[in-house]
């Protein structure tokens, strides 16, 4: 995702243009901005929130919640994979068990 070199990427959120300096690929940066724009617009279309800044904060909270849920799911999946790996290791002949110990990086 990171190119190592900062580039300027122009994005639009709620009709406002922003130039972002980022190491991420331009396509990634534009996709992130589009996702945020869509989330804010969705909150605004609900009618309960009128101010764009409040909608942006609510969208940020919603997106952060999604991030936390994804991290929890990822952690649970890593734990399950480590458990399965340990179960499989026990089924291997003793001479093969050490060579099968490849750690899962989280």
Image (cartoon, grey):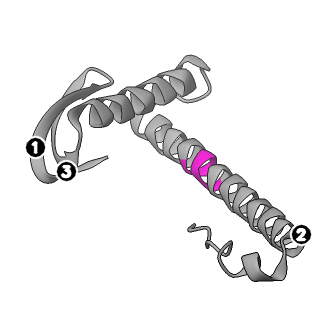
Q: Quick check: 37 left or right of 10?
A: right
Residue at image location 37% in from the left, 35% down from the top: 32
| Residue, disc 3 | 23
Crowdedness of circle 2 by 10 Å Cα count: few (<14), some, many (20+)? few
Q: Quick check: 58 left or right of 34?
A: right
Crowdedness of circle 3 by 10 Å Cα count: few (<14), some, many (20+)? some
Res 87 quadrant in image: bottom right
Mark number, residue 91: 2
| Residue, disc 1 | 7
Q: CA distance from mark 2 to mark 1?
A: 51 Å
Q: Which residues are magenta?
A: 64-68
Q: Horizontal and vertical percent for residue 50?
A: 49, 27
Element marked by disc 1: strand
Q: Horizontal and vertical percent for residue 35?
A: 44, 29
Identify the image quadrant of the C terminus: bottom right
Does the segment drawn in magenta span residue 39? no
Q: Horizontal and vertical percent for residue 45?
A: 55, 17
Front in this rendered view, residue 77 or 31 = 77
- Residue 64 higher or lower than 9, as above or below: below
Q: Quick check: 57 left or right of 33?
A: right
Q: Which of the marked residues, 3 or 2, is nearer the chain's N terminus?
A: 3
Query: Is the C-beta separation of discs 3 and 2 under 8 Å?
Result: no
- Residue 72 higher or lower than 102, as above or below: above
Res 83 quadrant in image: bottom right
| Label 2 vs label 1, nearer the camera | 2
Element marked by disc 3: strand
| Label 3 vs label 2, nearer the camera | 2
Query: Is the C-beta separation of discs 3 and 1 under 8 Å?
Result: yes
């Amino acid at each position: 995702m990171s190119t190592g070199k900062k580039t300027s990427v122009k994005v639009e959120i709620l009709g406002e243009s922003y130039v972002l300096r980022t190491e991420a690929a331009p396509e990634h940066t534009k996709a992130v901005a589009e996702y945020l724009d869509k989330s804010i617009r969705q909150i605004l279309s609900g009618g309960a929130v009128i101010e764009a800044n409040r909608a942006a904060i609510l969208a940020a909270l919603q997106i952060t919640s999604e991030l936390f849920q994804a991290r929890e799911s990822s952690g649970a999946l890593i734990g399950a994979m480590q458990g399965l790996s340990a179960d499989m290791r026990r089924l291997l002949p003793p001479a093969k068990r050490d060579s099968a110990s490849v750690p899962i990086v989280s």
